[in-house]
Amino acid sequence: MEWCVSTTIFSEKPVGVVTASANGEKGHEELLLILKTLGAKVDDHQLLIKGIKGKFDKNGSIENDTFTEISKFITNFEKSIDN
């Protein structure tokens, strides 16, 4: 499991969480718990992508449905931090 932190101060800040894994449910839950304990706002800013290896074609391009999900996530997160 890899994760990236874009800020060192989580308290009352919106945080986006993306978990891309074979299954990822448990790891996603645990990461959310840690972030909420640190005071991060993650309620509407999370995306779980199960079976990530199967989401790419032979050329390494991500499938349209997954790309759409990620694009929506990014757009919604950007809107939430602009307000």
Image: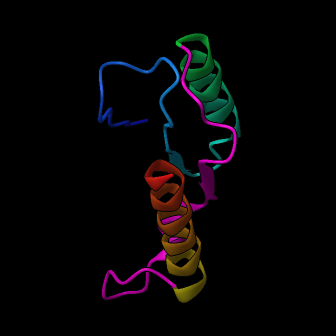
Q: Is residue 61 highlighted in magenta?
A: yes
Total marks shown come to 0
Residue at 54% over, 52% down: 80
Give the left or right position of residue 50, taking residue 64 as reference: right
Q: Where 2 sits versus 35, above or below?
A: below
Q: Residue furthest top?
A: 37
Q: Quadrant of residue 5?
A: top left
Q: Where 29 sits versus 61, above or below?
A: above
Q: Quadrant of residue 73?
A: bottom right
Q: Is residue 76 highlighted in magenta?
A: no
Residue at 61% over, 53% down: 47
Q: Where 37 sits versus 82, above or below?
A: above
Could you say where residue 66 lies in the image, as x and y percent from the top left?
56, 75
Q: Where 4 sits versus 12, above or below?
A: below
Residue at 56% over, 16% down: 39
The image's colouring method is rainbow
Give the left or right position of residue 4, taking residue 30 as reference: left
- As rendered, which of 34 and 28 lies closer to the eye? 34
Could you say where residue 77 lies in the image, as x and y percent from the top left?
51, 56
Could you say where residue 26 lies in the image, as x and y percent from the top left?
69, 31
Q: Quadrant of residue 60?
A: bottom left
- As rendered, which of 67 and 10 lies closer to the eye? 10
Residue at 38% over, 36% down: 3
Give the left or right position of residue 44, taking residue 69 as reference: right
Q: Residue furthest front?
A: 83
- Magenta-tinted stretch: 39-63
Could you say where residue 7 lies in the image, as x and y percent from the top left?
30, 28
Magenta region, main secondary structure: loop
Give the left or right position of residue 2, taking residue 45 as reference: left
In the picture, the quarter occupied by the N terminus is top left
